[in-house]
Amino acid sequence: MNQDFIKQDYAEAQDAKDKLKFFREEFYHPQSANGNRRKYFCGHSLGLQPKRVEKYVNEDLKKWQKLAVRGHFSGDFPWMPYHEFIAPLLMPLVGAQRNEVVCMNSLTANLHFMMVSFFNPNDKRYKILIEADAFPSDRYAVTSQLQFHNLDPKEALIEIKSRETETTFRLDDILSVIEENKDSLALILLPGVQYYTGQVLPIAEITKFAHRYNIKVGFDLAHAAGNLELDLHAWGVDFACWCHYKYLNSGPGAVGGCFVHEKHVTDKNLKKFLGWWGHNKQTRFTMPNAYESMQTAESWQLSNPPIISLCAIRASLEIFQEAGIKNLRIKSKKLTAYLENLIKHYCSDTIKIITPDERGCQLSLKIKTTNAQACADGLDKLDIDCDFRYPDVIRVAPVPLYNSFTDVWDFVNAIKKLV
Ligand SMILES: Cc1ncc(COP(=O)(O)O)c(C=O)c1O
């Protein structure tokens, strides 16, 4: 391999020709005590704040001051249909049709609401398949759903593990477990990107295979939305849920997102918990007792949404619209490959990259020589934000919207000394 990439001016040259570099200044970058801009690699946990969020939020705070209840129907973005302004921005990010996507609640709450509809166990089909290292909230959600249906998770929860000496999943292994349990599985809930290893799972293949046996398939896209190009409609996924506070940069605890495939949105036989925001919007305010469902994913909405949080989401998703997820993905692949190449060049004895080639922007670095927590603390002192995951992994996410090749260079320059 040409060794030019190990020179610092390589990073500068890549930044200079990067067409997306101006988006970096659309964000507030955290600062250290002495006012230096910190290098931020924690988009997998909490994305940076887009500068325009403040403007959008302030506009609606002002609107509330000046118009109060009339704000529901006034201005360019009235509150009554506010979530409808978000859906078109989300569609290209997750590959959804207009009627398949809605912004509501939070991720774990949405998983529960989806399971109300897509997990209806009977004597024959009653099991749920997850991964053994599922994010704890997903595990709690599926376990409590099983218990809610008087099922014992010890018997009804199937967990896919990676092989003994491996850290990531093989598609064949996943498909074999599905095949073995094809008659008893009711639901599969897997991540689009595994939060610890950064592995991308083949959503389309898993979904297609499971559907052969009439098993419902849902995905937790917390680490995939805004990170990968997704095509949920074409892939036929039954449902998917994600948050907006990681790669979608919409602020801590931002409202979540939910996809329900078109084939289900008008299905009257699906069980659902109801609220007035899922009722036909034409007659919602005549306050009828009889429920009449929206004919879209919006029918899963319960309440009128928190507008201030949606303001942040609208501001942030506009930036994605301007940059284009395709362009972002192209840059992301280069940026993460650059990180990988530098780590392999400088730290091959000290760091093992556990993230496979099927990945988004995150690399998970297993620190072999020293305590990973101490290493993360050392990076922190050098004004670098990334995160430590017990016992020995540091997760680093160069995010194409706001990270540069120079950031990556600086990161590797710092970590190579610490390990
Ligand atoms: C993969 C994954 N699933 C679920 C959650 C829980 O999200 P929430 O607190 O928004 O329900 C998180 C939070 O970080 C996550 O990373």
Image (spheres, rainbow, N blue to C red):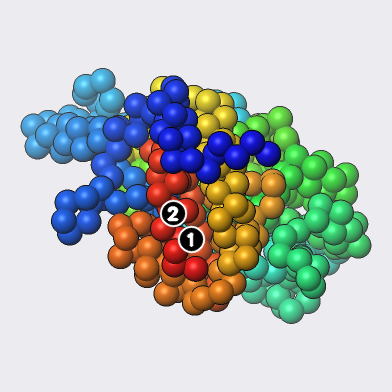
* Any part of residue 284 in sight: no
Residue sitting nearer the eye, 103 or 4: 4
Q: Position of residue 380 (x, y in %)?
A: 34, 63
Residue sitting nearer the eye, 81 or 390: 390
Residue sitting nearer the eye, 120 or 352: 352
**At x 72% / y 35%, what residue is drawn?**
235
Q: Is residue 150 left or right of residue 258?
A: right
Residue sitting nearer the eye, 406 or 279: 406
Q: Is residue 66 left or right of residue 267?
A: left
Label placed on residue 413: 2
Please, what secondary structure does the residue beneath circle 1 have? helix
Q: Position of residue 140 (x, y in %)?
A: 57, 70
Which amino acid does the dot numbered 2 rest on?
Asn
Q: Marks 2 and 1: in contact by CB < 8 Å?
A: yes
Name the quadrant containing residue 1.
Answer: top right
**At x 37% / y 70%, what residue is drawn?**
377
Q: Position of residue 96 (x, y in %)?
A: 59, 30
| Above/below status of 345 relative to 146 | above
